[in-house]
């Protein structure tokens, strides 16, 4: 019964989306009519009910997974009655159908949120926005209903399911897709706002202020998702790397790049009424990148180490949706951009100018990632097999990324509207000196380190110093929260880049085959293989190595890397053992044994690698502070207006 | 600066950025793209030995041989048309096994064998490179 109820809720939600689209049409068309107020109230309620129905449908899917109802095809294919509860729940979205239901649920709930809380937009614009949101929803409801029904029954039912891919049985990954989807779908709201504003020719600071929290929220979730995904790949896959330029990773990076650019340009629009057309364009591009990401991951079109579904029908369906929505929105943009009147102007040497530079550099990076991700597909269509890897991206992107670091450092040092070079040079003196000194020190002390890495570390020191400049001579308690947000996010960028550069410049690797009792060394560590022993977990068994590690004359500690065997489905996984020290991480992997009693051990000493994810966390925290600060300020302003 | 001029300057900058992105990407593509080969692509032909490439296919049955140093293995990659011997030093990924798909990153040697410095196996145990899947499917269909 639960499955049927879930399907019914899904269809009802789809019906409400259809009604929402029609009511929105009417409300937007008759914006001047006094009776439109009733229509708007109805529209807001419809959007809310649509969100609740989608949520109900998804909750029922989770209930099916929790009860291990093996008469449902999706549960049987992706769950197992003996699985730990957290992975039963996560199993609901650890597959194609469930994740698409999650997608549409977040979309509908976000639409309901806009309907409930958005009070600043003109009625017509809000109606058009909710209409656009409903139109996106309808496409995805159709996709679920016709191409990937999550509630399909399995007849006859099976006693036990096939289990979840063991690599996905990890707390980090269980929450990874929902986080990314919240980001993707937050960008859908920005897209709907842009479409609404274009339809109603209502582009200005009020529109930008309404859109900004959604962009910020989406961007925070994307940042967390990418950071967590990177750390997951790092500790779970056992290959010691933190970014692979895999198409599936790029699929989440591209919306993030677009959202980062959008976040900066929407601020110019909200506070200075500049960059109108460009901001609209970015809002469309950002959501296009979300949909492209969904398409790449879900269509199985890519040669990826981690693409999931392989089903051409679904790929075609998502591609058609992508074409309709993005093509339609771009056509609308082309038709209406002429009527978006010129915003206010600014000098090129100004905060706006730096933000434009930031946007252009981010767009270049986005363009390169886009080409690198899709070129193999285009070549394949032309009959040529090729794949593009890290060397391509590193060569094309490292110089642009370093230029972006400089622009990021300069931006907050500049004044709005107009500034001059001399004043900038004076303010940039301390950060530049800091970068220069660290470059000289590194160059002298770390001979043989890669030149680009040394430059990157020096620039990140300069960026860190420049980042705190906006709060350096202010009353810290009276500094607005969103300024703190900017400072911390920029500091996070500096910290991340320092971590990446440090890892690529200074990591040391050792691969050895040793018997129990023997030892090997890596960097400053001496590692002894003390024991190999069996271990049993809830749904796996493992061989575990006990490694005794000692750094110089320091205190010894132990690490336990494992080789795990899962029976359903039969799979081996490597569980790396990692220890985090103040100045880096020691990363150990157990390989296979041979007839002579030797065991493969792979060791990495990675100085300051943790800074990569710490920086990601700081960036997200900065976004959160900015979001809270902006929302609070908006509320205060609207109260002030009410009393005025 | 007049609004019109500013728009012009910004437009030109944006154009420059797009051209820059394309230029960077193309120049990097030209000499850095790791080209993808299936064993059938290189059978009886001269192979490029000077650049990093990827070799994709299935690990042939009973072909994995451990080397005496304990950290190297040798195996052959096949796509049903031809096979290429591969040497690899390192810990093979979890899903690397005989009869399953693999992508080896590395270089061809002058004798046509391949030295891999990285092996990729798929998360999903059903994975094989699409073009290999296509070939296998064709072969299976012909056999029937």
Image (cartoon, coloured by chain):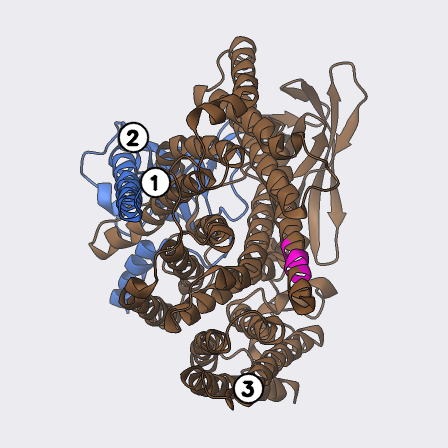
Instruction: Mark 2 vs mark 3: tell me if same chain.
Output: no
Kindly indicate whether the residue at mark 1 contacts the one at mark 2 (C-beta within 8 angstroms).
no
Image side of residue A161 versus residue B35, left or right: right
Q: Residues within 10 Å of mark 1 (few under 14, many from 20)?
A: many
Q: CA distance from mark 1 to mark 3?
A: 62 Å
Label 1 sits on residue = B54
A338 is higher (above) or lower (below) than A143: above
Q: CA distance from mark 2 to mark 3?
A: 67 Å
Please give the label number shown on residue A37: 3
Please give the label number shown on residue A586: none
Across and down, in percent, residue A68 comes to: 68, 75
Q: Which chain is brown?
A: A
Q: Which of A610 and A186 lies nearest the eye of the viewer? A: A186
Please give the label number shown on residue B51: 2
Residue drawn at x 48%, y 66% is A188
Question: SS at mark 2?
Answer: loop
Q: Which chain is blue?
A: B
User: From this viewpoint, which residue is outermost toward the front?
Assistant: A644
Residue A63: quadrant of the picture: bottom right
Q: What residue span does the magenta drawing correspond to?
A: A630-636
């Amino acid at each position: 019964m639960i499955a049927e109820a879930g399907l019914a809720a899904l269809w009802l939600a789809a019906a409400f989306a259809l009604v929402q689209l029609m009511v929105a049409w009417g409300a937007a068309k008759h914006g001047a009519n006094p009776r439109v107020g009733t229509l708007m109230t109805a529209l807001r309620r419809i959007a809310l009910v649509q969100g609740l129905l989608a949520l109900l449908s998804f909750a029922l899917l989770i209930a099916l997974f929790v009860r291990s109802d093996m008469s449902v095809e999706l549960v049987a294919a992706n769950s197992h009655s003996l699985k730990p509860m957290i992975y039963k729940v996560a199993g609901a979205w650890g597959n194609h159908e469930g994740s698409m239901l999650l997608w549409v649920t977040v979309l509908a709930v976000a639409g309901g949120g806009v309907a409930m809380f958005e009070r600043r937009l003109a009625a017509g614009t809000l109606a058009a926005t909710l209409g656009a949101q409903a139109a996106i929803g309808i496409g995805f409801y159709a996709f679920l209903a016709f191409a990937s029904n999550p509630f399909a029954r399995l007849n006859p039912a099976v006693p036990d399911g096939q289990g979840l891919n063991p690599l996905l049985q990890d707390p980090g990954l269980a929450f990874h897709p929902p986080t990314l989807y919240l980001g993707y779908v937050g960008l859908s709201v920005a897209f709907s706002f842009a479409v609404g504003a274009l339809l109603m020719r209502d582009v200005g600071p009020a529109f930008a202020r309404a859109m900004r929290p959604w962009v910020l929220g989406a961007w925070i979730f994307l940042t967390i998702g990418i950071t967590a995904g990177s750390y997951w790949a790092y500790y779970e896959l056992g290959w010691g790397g933190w970014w692979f330029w895999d198409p599936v990773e790029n699929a989440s990076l591209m919306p993030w790049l677009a959202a980062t650019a959008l976040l900066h340009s929407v601020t110019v629009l909200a506070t200075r009424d500049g960059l109108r057309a460009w901001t609209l364009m970015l809002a469309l591009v950002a959501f296009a990148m979300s949909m492209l990401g969904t398409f790449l991951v879900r269509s199985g079109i890519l040669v990826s180490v981690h693409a999931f579904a392989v089903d051409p029908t679904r790929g075609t369906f998502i591609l058609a949706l992508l074409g309709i929505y993005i093509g339609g929105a771009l056509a609308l943009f082309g038709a209406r951009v002429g009527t978006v009147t010129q915003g206010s102007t600014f000098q090129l040497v100004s905060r706006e100018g730096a933000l434009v530079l930031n946007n252009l550099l981010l767009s270049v990076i986005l363009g390169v990632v886009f080409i690198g991700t899709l070129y193999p597909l285009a070549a394949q269509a032309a009959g040529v097999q090729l794949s593009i890897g890290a060397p391509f991206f590193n060569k094309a992107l490292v110089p642009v990324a370093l230029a972006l670091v400089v622009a990021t450092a300069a931006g907050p040092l500049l004044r709005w509207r107009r500034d001059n070079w001399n004043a900038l040079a004076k303010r940039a003196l301390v950060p530049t000196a800091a970068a220069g000194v660290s470059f000289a020190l590194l160059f002298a002390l770390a001979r043989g380190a890669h030149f680009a890495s040394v430059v990157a570390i020096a620039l990140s020191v300069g960026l860190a110093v420049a980042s705190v400049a906006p709060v350096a001579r202010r009353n810290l308690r009276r500094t607005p929260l969103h300024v703190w947000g900017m400072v911390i996010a920029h500091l996070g960028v500096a910290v991340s880049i320092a971590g990446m550069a440090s890892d690529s410049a200074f990591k040391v690797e050792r691969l050895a085959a040793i018997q129990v009792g023997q030892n090997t060394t890596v960097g400053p560590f001496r590692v002894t293989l003390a024991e190999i022993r069996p271990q049993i977990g809830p749904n796996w068994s493992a061989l575990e190595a006990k490694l005794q590690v000692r750094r110089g004359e320091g205190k010894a500690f132990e690490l336990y890397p494992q080789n795990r065997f899962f029976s359903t489905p039969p799979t081996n996984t490597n569980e790396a053992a990692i220890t985090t020290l103040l100045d880096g991480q020691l990363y150990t992997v157990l390989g296979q044994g041979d007839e002579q009693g030797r065991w493969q051990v792979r060791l990495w000493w990675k100085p300051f690698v943790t800074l990569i994810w710490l920086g990601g966390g700081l960036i997200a925290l900065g976004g959160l502070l900015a979001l809270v600060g902006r929302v609070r300020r908006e509320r205060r302003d609207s109260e002030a207006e009410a009393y005025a | 600066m007049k609004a019109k001029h500013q728009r012009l300057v910004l437009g030109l900058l944006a154009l420059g950025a797009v051209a820059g992105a394309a230029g960077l990407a193309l120049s990097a593509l030209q000499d850095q793209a790791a080209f993808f080969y299936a064993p059938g692509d290189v059978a009886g032909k001269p192979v490029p030995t000077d650049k990093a490439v990827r070799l994709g296919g299935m690990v042939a049955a009973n072909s994995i041989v451990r080397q005496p140093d304990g950290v190297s293995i040798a195996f052959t990659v096949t796509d049903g048309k031809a096979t290429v011997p591969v040497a690899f030093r390192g810990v093979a990924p979890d899903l690397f096994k005989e009869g399953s798909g693999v992508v080896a990153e590395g270089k061809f040697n002058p004798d046509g064998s391949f030295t891999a410095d990285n092996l990729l196996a798929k998360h999903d145990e059903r994975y094989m490179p699409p073009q290999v899947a296509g070939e296998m499917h064709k072969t299976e269909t012909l056999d029937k």
